[in-house]
Image (cartoon, helix red, strand yellow):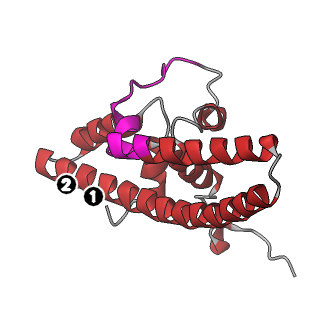
Amino acid sequence: MDDINPLLLIAAVLDPRYKLDYVEYCFGDIYAEDVAGLMTKNLKEILMSLYDWYKASEVILDSNQSSKDKELESCVTNEKNSEVDINLLRISKFKRKKAAKESIEIKNEVDRYLLDPCEDISKKDFDVLNCWRVNGTKYPILSKLAKDVFAIQVSTVERFLIPFEVL
């Protein structure tokens, strides 16, 4: 996999029409079975490393949110008749508890995404970014990763191919 930009492969995996199965199939078409299996395993490890990095970043953001909740809680205790603030605090705590429970029940978003069925490949007007926007609540961390991967410029023009030099 040294000659291949892994982000191109990650982009293919993050395309809901193809996912890892298609990339694995293509590897099998090109390489020997053992090499294809190893390449697929390495690709999933790269994806999991990226996911773990994004997840760790999300935990930092959540800890900042917890401090904001504590500030909100102190405001609520200072104002005895503030039902709106109490409800906001309750909803915020509920969302955090629900998210924590769901993350325990599901091994991780990557496995869930890979197990979900692929989108229809024959759709001509398929918009991969819109698909991730729509599924942002289902895969909150993976959708951020996908948006960043699809925003990366993966091709460059070699200097010797440019017929003139800009001064």
**24 with respect to 141 (left or right):** left
The numbered disc on residue 18 is: none
Q: Secondary structure at mark 1?
A: helix
> Mark 1 and mark 2 in contact (Cβ < 8 Å)?
yes
Which quadrant does the C terminus fall into?
bottom right
Instruction: Report x, y in % for residue 78.
Output: 80, 61
- CA gap, disc 2 to disc 1? 6 Å
When the figure is inspected, residue 159 is found, relative to residue 12, above or below; the finding is below
Residue at x-position 21% and y-position 48%: 36
Nearer the observer, 35 or 63 = 63
**92 with respect to 37 (left or right):** right
Residue at x-position 31% and y-position 45%: 107
Q: Identify the residue under disc 1.
A: 42
Q: Identify the residue under disc 2.
A: 38
Q: Quadrant of residue 102?
A: top left
**148 with respect to 54 (left or right):** right
- Tell me the amino acid under the disc marked 1: Asn
Residue at x-position 70% and y-position 63%: 68
**54 with respect to 48 (left or right):** right
Nearer the observer, 80 or 56 = 80
Residue 144 falls inside the magenta stretch: no
- Tell me the amino acid under the disc marked 2: Leu
| Residue 5 visible, this orientation | no
Instruction: Report x, y in % for residue 160.
Output: 64, 73
Residue at x-position 12% and y-position 50%: 34
When the figure is inspected, residue 119 is found, relative to residue 91, above or below; the finding is above
Instruction: Report x, y in % for residue 127.
Output: 64, 30
Q: Secondary structure at mark 2?
A: helix
Stretch of the chain drawn in magenta: 101-123
Instruction: Report x, y in % for residue 130.
Output: 66, 33
